[in-house]
Amino acid sequence: MAHHKSAIKRIKIAERNRTRNRFYRSTMRTQLKRVYATENRDEALGAYNKASSILDKLVAKGIIHKNMAANKKASLMKHVNSLT
């Protein structure tokens, strides 16, 4: 256990950030699953737009890397285009 005041504060901040980041990543994964779960192209496109927006927000917040977001969006779009 930390003894210095600043170290105790950093532990609290790290825990707060960890829980917040877990929430954001969980939300991202849920949206990605929704895109893959849809069979209809129009519904999948709508879900893709929402997922893409969430990915962009996570990049802006520094939760995920921009290349990871780009790869996920490309993979999602490939799936949407494969639907009829």
Image (tube, rainbow, N blue to C red):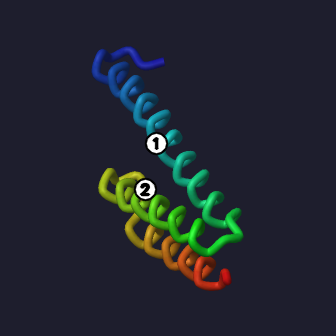
User: Which residue appears at 44% of the width and 74% of the height?
Assistant: 70
Mark 1 lies on residue: 21
Residue type beneath disc 1: Asn
Where's residue 63, x and y in %? 41, 52
Where's residue 41, x and y in %? 61, 75
Residue type beneath disc 2: Ile
Q: Is residue 49 left or right of residue 35?
A: left
Cα distance between the residues tagged 1 and 2? 13 Å
Q: Could you say whether the residue bearing mark 1 is in a helix, strand or loop? A: helix
Say whether disc 1 or disc 2 marks the residue closer to the N-terminus.
1
Tell me the quadrant of the picture where the C terminus can be found: bottom right
Say if mark 1 contacts mark 2, CB within 8 Å: no
Using a 10 Å C-alpha cutoff, classify the residue at mark 1 as few (fewer than 14 neighbours), some (14 to 19) or many (20 or more).
some
Mark 2 lies on residue: 54
**Which label number is shown at residue 67?**
none
Position above or below: 20 against 52? above
User: Which residue appears at 38% of the width and 68% of the height?
Assistant: 66
**Viewer-nearest of labels 1 and 2?**
2
Residue in front for this viewpoint, 26 or 35: 35
User: Which residue appears at 59% of the width and 84% of the height?
Assistant: 81
Quarter of the rendering containing residue 15: top left
Position above or below: 31 against 4? below
